[in-house]
Image (cartoon, rainbow, N blue to C red):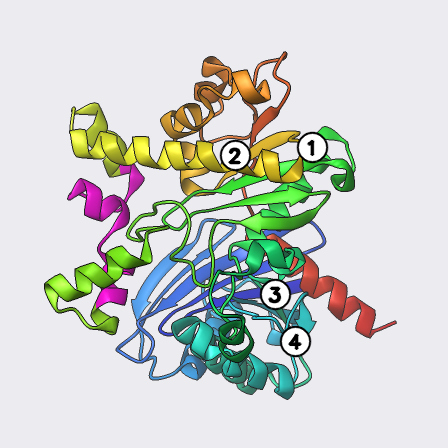
Amino acid sequence: MKILVINAGSSSLKYQLMNMDNEEVMAKGNCERIGIDGRITHKTASGYSTSEDCAFPTHTEAFEKVVEMLTQGEGKVVDSVSEIAAVGHRIVQGGAIFSQSVLVTDKVIDQIEGLAPLAPVHNLGAARALRACRKVFGENVPMVTVFDTAFHKTMPPKAYMYGLRYEDYEQYSIRKYGFHGTSHRFVSADFAKRIGKPLEELKLVTCHLGNGSSITAVDCGKSVDTTMGFTPLDGVIMGTRCGAIDPSAVLFLMQQTGMDAAEMSEYLNKKCGFLGISGRSSDNRDIEAGSAEGDERCQLVTEMLSYQIKKQIGAYAAAMNGLDAVVFTGGIGENAISIRGKACEGLDNILGLKVDPELNEKLNHASGRISTPDSKVEVWIVPTNEELLIAMDTMEIVSNLNK
């Protein structure tokens, strides 16, 4: 079965065509600057690669170009769009409505659009993409939505509620939702498979670290707490996001600078984090280079992130009343030796967790266990694959339609 996986934003459309018989990525690409001018990049498993400017007034034209790339010319990987059995869509915000992946209907699209106040940029773009996809592929090609927030629907109220008036939760749906759920779900299940133990018997802390980062407590396969909150701005320091902060600091800064709500949102989401602290870059590779050169502000970024990760590991071990493993994933989690090492420093005394420095360095850009043989808590690097999980969910739902 061939599944097309879509990750659409307000002005972009990333895609992967996957052959689920062998889980091979047949082709992948990205349509950028939708509604502005337009550009597409397209790569195939055979090594073919191309990039060209296109006219993308809407997502519809972007989907039409994707179909063209997949079925025509040198980058062709299928003879006809009829070979694509289904389309799986990543949706950022499922609110309190969606606790699992679902088959797309008109009602589902309307509900996703209705959740736009909780994620205006992401959900409006997703709704447009769903309608455009149906227009291009036709209603006979089933579509499935996979929600970033769904994995965190198992959090108890004590974890997802804020200390605001209860009426504000009831009226405005203000609560912790959590994000990166697709990644946390994938790596926790993949880790359990790697060590040959049932996920339902494990207590894990999964660390998805990248330009956006979140840490999740996974108790017996269920998310019981996570660092991102009402929006992806909460939690640990990130590429351009500040992470958790005293709300009064925001109010004070608005008073001092005269920034309005929109300007403050732009500041907190786009101008803080690694970029704001270092004054150099939002990319951790640049931060590592600066640290090696002796840049104290870059070194501070590394210290801050590592310290915050360490605190969360300890807190979640306490919340779950135990810990079997810490799993690192994402661009930073899989590739930053110093952050993994520093985040685990000093945890041997309270958790019996010990990282082997040589394994930590040897397995960089790879996967496997980096803890010592006598460590009571295992520490692993497990590469995430959100697209594969979306394809797997899509295949399962579509297969059940035919039974």
Label located before the other in sequence (2 or 4): 4
Give the alpha-carbon distance from disc 3 to disc 4, as whole Å. 22 Å
Residue at horizontal 62 percent and vertical 59 percent from the top: 157
Quadrant the C terminus occupies? bottom right
Looking at the rendering, the stretch of residues picked out in magenta corresponds to: 264-285
In the picture of the structure, the residue carrying the numbered disc 4 is: 82
In the picture of the structure, the residue carrying the numbered disc 2 is: 313
Around disc 3, counting alpha carbons within 10 Å, would you say few (fewer than 14), some (14 to 19), or many (20 or more)? many
Answer above or below: position of 105 versus 239: below
Q: Which mark is residue 146?
A: 3
Tell me the element at label 4.
helix
Taking the image as shown, residue 281 lies to the left or right of residue 236, namely: left
- Give the mark toward the camera: 4 or 1: 1
Among the 4 quarters of the image, the one containing residue 291: top left
Answer above or below: position of 219 versus 163: above
Label located before the other in sequence (2 or 3): 3
Residue at horizontal 41 percent and vertical 82 percent from the top: 61
In the picture of the structure, the residue carrying the numbered disc 1 is: 194
The kind of residue on which mark 1 rests is: Arg
Check contact, mark 3 vs mark 4: CB within 8 A.
no
The kind of residue on which mark 3 rests is: Val
Among the 4 quarters of the image, the one containing residue 200: top right
- Give the mark toward the camera: 2 or 4: 2
Q: Nearer the viewer, residue 31 or 298?
A: 298
The kind of residue on which mark 4 rests is: Ser
Query: Across the whole image, how many numbered discs are drawn on residues?
Result: 4
Tell me the element at label 1.
helix
The kind of residue on which mark 2 rests is: Ile
Main SS, magenta residues: helix
